[in-house]
Image (cartoon, rainbow, N blue to C red):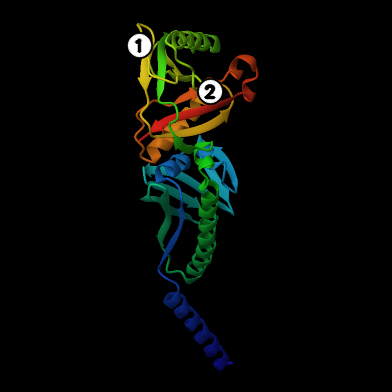
Amino acid sequence: MKKLLISVLLVLIAGLACTYLFLPSAISIEESTSINSSSRALFRQFSNSKNLKKWWPGTIIVKDKVPHYLYNDNDYQITPVDYTLFSARIKGPDSILQTRIYFFAVNIDSTQLLWTAKKQVSLNPVERINVYLATRKLKKDMSFLLEKFRQHYVKPESLYGMKITIGPVVDTSMIAIFGVSTIYPTDKTLFNQVAKLQAYALSKGAVQSGYPMVNINTDHLNAIKYEVALPINKVINSSAEVIQKRLPPGRILMSEVIGGNNTIEKAITSIKNYGYDHKFNMYVIPFFALNADRLTEADTSKRVTKIYCPIF
């Protein structure tokens, strides 16, 4: 009996020794992934709780106006620290862990995400084993969540809400009219301006060569400024009202959206973000093509509008 007790005691001592020898006194987790997307665009998406809903695999609840992202028995609270770093507080059934998510720009179209965590572990051997097992589970969860984020945002359409392509500038010569309004200009107002431009072009022997173009600027106090331009086949002189303009040959960002004015405004913001994210020189304010169906299609949810932004 005495030998048995000694044997059991030796086994326990050996087990404790292994616990302290092979299980670290501090846990360290590091998971990473690479995404072929702009770091600025990814950070903008990650900063918006509405966007996290698009790819988060678990449940999202709001407590005291703070979103909590639930997944696999853990509660994640994600907070931006600066333009390359997020703090992610992970509350599990028995512990709380502070982690950090870094966004590293490898180049314009490539980003590395690094998710790290460190924590001292108690000397209690039972707690040390529990923490070790929980850490293994959390490491897998962190890897899985990074992969879900990567899969969703590897497509530019998910980052900008639309497909954006780059093509050559086709129409380099145009004439334009500027206007100011206290309300958002109606389609009738815009097409009246188009009619003036068409009449002026005809009087100078020029021919319309593309869709009319419109830019509407709502950034001014108590006024909305807009510009309507008409592509033409040759250079003509300006008048008191009509201004001759030129676009230098080069490249242009292009997209297409379906919807009304709010959709167009969001698309213009997205195409500007794309230009900023890729460090293009946008020497002209983005504009949209004024399609004829704006007058014939009353249902704005069916209107197709092309968005453009010349770049260097």
- Tag 1 secondary structure: loop
Closer to the camera, 6 or 159? 159
Q: In the rendered picture of this protein, how many numbered marks are placed on residues?
A: 2
Q: Amino acid at mark 1?
A: Ser
Q: Is residue 13 visible?
A: yes
Q: Is residue 183 visible?
A: no
Residue 184: x and y, percent? 49, 13
Residue 126: x and y, percent? 51, 70
Q: Residue at x 53, y 41 (%)?
A: 158
Q: Quadrant of the N terminus?
A: bottom right
Give the alpha-carbon distance from disc 1 to disc 2, as whole Å: 33 Å
Front position among marks 1 and 2: 1
Closer to the camera, 91 or 32? 32
Compared to residue 255, the image places residue 8 above or below, namely below
Dividing the picture into quadrants, the one containing residue 44 is top left
Q: Residue at x 56, y 41 (%)?
A: 53
Circle 1 residue: 238
Q: Give the label on residue 262, or none.
A: 2
Identify the mark nearer the N-term, 1 or 2. Answer: 1
